[in-house]
Image (cartoon, grey):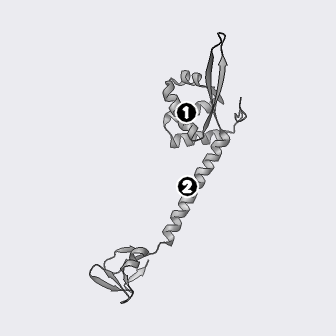
Amino acid sequence: MDQEVLYEVPASMKRLIRLVTRGFYSPEHAIVIDMLVRNPCMKEDDMLELLKFDRKQLRAIVNTLKNDKFIKVHMRMVTDDEGRTTRHNYYFISYVMFVNVVKYKLDHVRRKIQMEERDNTSRASFRCDECQKTFTDLEADQLFDFMTQTFRLHTYSYTIQTIFLK
């Protein structure tokens, strides 16, 4: 078959793939993954028989997992006794690819959180002592009158001392 089919997978890896599919996918996806965790490589017809899905439904689920790089498909052409050739799809979990995808997605989430934190901490905000209204640094820049050294809020004018940095 293929070199990516693993027959001995650590229990922690099996648990991780099950948790990820249960957390982010439908129950049908989790069932397919559970089936492939128990059986390292399965023929499509066997999966259809065991899961009682119709072929269209199984292929939709498998395509989602395949696009997310959780599973792979190996197609084998088989010639029967009468000379007819048929295609058989074999599905298996690509654990190496799965680990890389999880690492990538976690790194992406980490970077997004860091960017949000950096944006929130670097963004100055100002608050008016009179009305308690808050302004971002961009809004404060537009409200500040350099000639009079005051902030202009609506019809009122406040000196720079009445609006302070939080």
Give the SS element for disc 2. helix
**Which one is nearer the viewer's eye here, 40 or 68?**
68
Q: In which quarter of the image is residue 76?
A: top right
Seen from this angle, which residue lies furthest bottom?
148
Give the side of residue 79 with respect to residue 63, left or right. Answer: right
Residue 12 in sight here? no
Residue 137 in sight here? yes
Q: Quadrant of residue 42?
A: top right
Q: Residue 147 shows which numbered tag?
A: none
Q: What residue type is labelled 1?
A: Val
Q: What residue type is labelled 2?
A: Val
Q: Earlier in the sequence, mark 1 or mark 2?
A: 1
Residue receiving disc 1 = 62
> Which quadrant does the C terminus fall into?
bottom left
> Which quadrant does the N terminus fall into?
top right
Residue 144 in the image, given as x and y percentages of width and height: 38, 82
Task: Name the residue rendered at 70%, 34% in the picture.
Answer: 6
Q: With respect to residue 47, does 29 lie above or below?
A: below
Seen from this angle, which residue lies furthest top?
82
Residue 49 in the image, given as x and y percentages of width and height: 55, 21
Residue receiving disc 2 = 109
Give the side of residue 21 with respect to residue 143, left or right. Answer: right
Residue 126 in the image, given as x and y percentages of width and height: 41, 77
